[in-house]
Amino acid sequence: MSAPFRFPRFFVTSPAPCPYLPGKTERKVFTELTGQHATDLNDALGRIGFRRSQGVAYRPSCIDCAACISVRVVAGEFQPSATQRKMLRRHADLEVTACKPWTTEEQYALLRRYLKMRHPGGGMADMDESDFADMIEQSPVKTYVIEYREPSVDGRPGRLVGACLTDQQADGLSMIYSFFEPDDPKRPGLGTYIILDHIIRAGRANLPYVYLGYWVEDSRRMAYKARFRPLEKLGPQGWSRFEPDQRELPLGR
């Protein structure tokens, strides 16, 4: 009797500087997502902490560090805080559309503004239009670009203020990468709103979880993820609830 699909081959990257913790190095284990069973493989790997990038699933495999922790929100039990309810009301006029994963010039221009203001020295700072198209369009699984626009005028689409590359997995939504209008005084907290919108949509679709990627306790860049409760983390014994320290959480994103 033959197996329904071939067991994937895994590879390990060379060590590189960690983007989250100064002085640390990172290493990743990864495998290709190809063939007719790519969706099933991505779902299975997602449940054990892997993330997707184009046609590859990866997770940290650092030699002397285990700071990166996979986290997910329990969508069906989520109750927004007073601040989060205010954020939902503030941006309730936005028109949200789940688009096919095809890039547009408008999306790329928004990404460039976002990277320039929020991550000027990051690994994506030099991303050109071809790189952006690869990130969005090269997906072997069910993927959307969720667009957030200001209200349409005279039948014309409103201004694009946010977008998120999102995978729909068997047990939830996986937020691959989000970007939004940075530091717009008329639209504060768009990053938070995009996560809230995903949690609400997952709950309405009876999808149990929203996967937020990795949380690093000592990285302020990752601290915002701890504001969405109930939160589960992946440990040696599987997924479990946890309560991150909220003493120094940033107020907005």
Image (tube, rainbow, N blue to C red):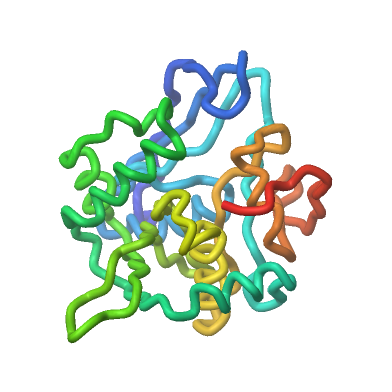
| Image: 185 above or below 61 | below
Residue at 49 percent across and 50 percent down: it is 45
Residue at 74 percent across and 73 percent down: it is 82
Which image quadrant: the N terminus?
bottom left
Nearer to me, 244 or 47 = 244
Side (left or right) of 101 relative to 182: left
Say which quarter of the image contains residue 55: top left
Q: Where residue 151 appears, x then y in whole percent? A: 33, 79
Q: Where residue 178 appears, x then y in whole percent? A: 42, 53
Q: Where residue 58 appears, x then y in whole percent? A: 45, 39
> In this orientation, does residue 233 appear?
yes
Residue at 32 percent across and 75 percent down: it is 97
In this view, the residue farthest toward the front is: 185
Mark count: 0
Q: Where residue 12 appears, x then y in whole percent? A: 45, 25
Say which quarter of the image contains residue 89: bottom right
| Image: 213 above or below 228 | above
